[in-house]
Image: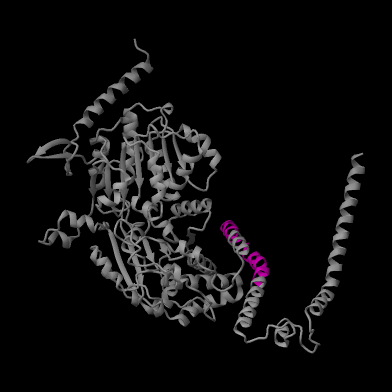
Amino acid sequence: MKPKRATCFAKEKEERENILQQVGLIPPRLTLKTTTSQGSQKNNGVQVYYATQFNHLPISRRTLYALKDSGYQQLTAIQKKALPLGLRGNDILGAARTGSGKTLTFLVPILEHLWRMDWTSWDGLGALIISPTRELAMQIFQVLRKVGKNHCFSAGLVIGGKDFEEERERIGRMNILIATPGRLLQHMDQSTDFDCSRLQILVLDEADQILDMGFQRTIDAILRNLPKQRQTLLFSATQTRSVQALARLSLEEPEYVAVYEKTPQEEDSKEIESEVGREESFVDIPLSLKQSYTVVQAPEKLNILWSFIKSHIRCKIIVFLASCKQVRFVYEAFRRMKPGLVLLHIHGRMKQSKRMIMYQQFCGQSYACLLATDVAARGLDFPQVDWVIQLDCPSHVQSYVHRIGRTARMNRSGNSLLFLLPSECVFLERLKSHHIEPKKHVVNKKKTRNISGTLASLNASDTSLKYLSQRALCCYIRSIALEGDKEIFDASQLPMEEMTRAYGLVTLPKYTIPKTVVRNHETSRNAFGYRRETTQEAIELELEKPSLHLSKEKEEEEEEEEEEEEEEEWLHPVDKEKEEEMELDSNWKAQELELEQRRLERREKKGKQSNQIGSPSLLAELGESDGKEVPSTIDEYAQRVRDKLLPQLEYINQIERNRVREMHKKRKWQKKNDE
């Protein structure tokens, strides 16, 4: 009688051989259609493969049981087309709407390919998945843990913000690696144990975003370190069939797979659109998503947003804004106004740990509102989102598609609402050219509450919120002015005075728009043919502070303090409000002094004030000329300042001497007790 362990090995070997035979029956180039039958056959000279469920595919029992336990049984449209090709070993260039199941489309072939080769931890790295963002990488890793729990492969996650030394110790033992481009290239350069010579499968998820975020050189460097004999899978929500754009990614005879849903108007139309034409303008939106837009004035945006949140407190909402400062200001202001549901925020300047806390907390809430920038617009799976609100017009159609893709995922229903200024209505024509036609909604002004007075009172009582309001307003104006498409974005038509009052301010803060940063609409196009997605978070980093200018060192300290304050506020949102005012009071005074000095320097340059040290007007501003004799030389003025500061200096020295004396007494007392 054979031992039980030997019997299991024999059964698994037999299963591998059977699956290899079934995979060999999949045609190399096939026309995939969905039906209730299973298998492959020839229909009028065209090879067709039928599969509607995971158990119809040549997949191992280990993977099937894990998929069943995770609730995956029926194949989605992209999975019906791409999974057989991926299991066979073809290079795939896939395009499908967000939330259509692209993650399983490349995870299942990875697990099956390594399982059929009897891959072990001693064989090294077998599959590499590159993701553009940390959040998406962590999401893929969580799905891999579910569907690959019955396999014996070792999987790792390599992203920025984690301990590099700890990753370097373990990266040599990984069979499946999920990484962001920057950290992956760092390990290739610095980790001696990292070996990619036996790589079998390379996956680029959200490939167009990887290229569009400025990782072209990084990807080129990574590809030079990978073996040429491999299977490459590229997936994205928006992607065209441009061979020139993706040839450098070294795909060998890729199979292009695109899935989109036809609207009833398209199905009834007699005109048949060519396949190539459809793929060049490929934008897929689920039919269960109800799209709408409304035309509002810029000063009314915050009023309408607040009224919408108050009337949808039993919904899950995501609100997209243009810049980090806007997200922070709206979150801080609305949090103090207490809308009646959980408020969260996420943006690119947050620390990675806090971004994940916010993401997980929003996913765990039944009713909540998440304020976010485009950092949360792609790839992330937020479950059961009811509404997606775009408070600011997106830069291009692809950004619009990715934003609304956070709702109506996996055949669920959802709603989206786009806020447009009267000057931004040209964006509707761009949407129409991509077969997207949202319905117009009119705002009921009777149910809209004006919150400008409330914001003004909050700004008056909280200097930190006032400063944040100034920066948010300036960042919004800059984001409009720096957009290259002037047909849509025109900062000259913004009503500045009304917007100042809408943000709770009395006067418009000063701002500057560097000419060298303004983007060119004609030349700023990437290889895919549409304009590069330069987020407002990146633009903010290149701009000056809006009103209160600080030195570079103080700016860095301020950013660190903001992050620390955000973390403390999330842990103790009520107890920290009074401490904020005390901590920021001294910083605010220093900023006012810095601003006053800059005003004096500008007056001196313009020649309105005399630059002599004995000028009565200049010394009056410094508090030195009221009824006193004005010093005629610099030495006299410096001596007068020393005389005034001398008593305070003596007092400080006396306190320091007393402190040192008490410290010595305490040490002597402790030493005596020890003896």
Report whether 599 appears left or right of 68. Answer: right
Q: Up-down: is 582 above or below 350?
A: below
Coordinates of residue 334 in the picture (x, y in percent)? 50, 68
Outermost residue on the left side: it is 44
Is residue 582 in the magenta section?
A: yes
Q: Is residue 87 depicted above or below 624 in this figure?
A: above
Foreground pick, 497 / 242: 242
Scheme of colours in the image: one colour
Image point 73% across, 87% down: which residue? 616
- Which quadrant of the view contains residue 20? top left
Looking at the image, can residue 68 be seen? no
Q: Considering the whole magenta stretch, tell me its main secondary structure.
A: helix
Residue 96 appears at what percent x and percent y?
A: 28, 51
The quadrant of the image that shows the C terminus is top right
Q: Residue at x 48, y 36 (%)?
A: 171
- For residue 606, side relative to residue 105 (left or right): right
- Asked if the magenta segment contains residue 165, the reply would be no
Q: From this viewpoint, which residue is outermost toward the bottom?
A: 627
Q: Residue furthest top?
A: 1
Query: Front-most of 530 and 278?
Result: 530
Residue 624 visible to the viewer: yes
Q: Is residue 597 left or right of residue 473?
A: right
Quadrant that contains the N terminus:
top left
- The span picked out in magenta is 561-588
Given residues 90 and 215, the one toward you in this image is: 215
The vertical placement of 66 against 590, above or below, is above
Location of residue 88 in the rendering, given as x and y in whole percent from the top left corner: 25, 35
Residue 630 pos. (x, y %): 79, 86
From the viewer's side, name the closer residue of 521 and 45.
Answer: 521
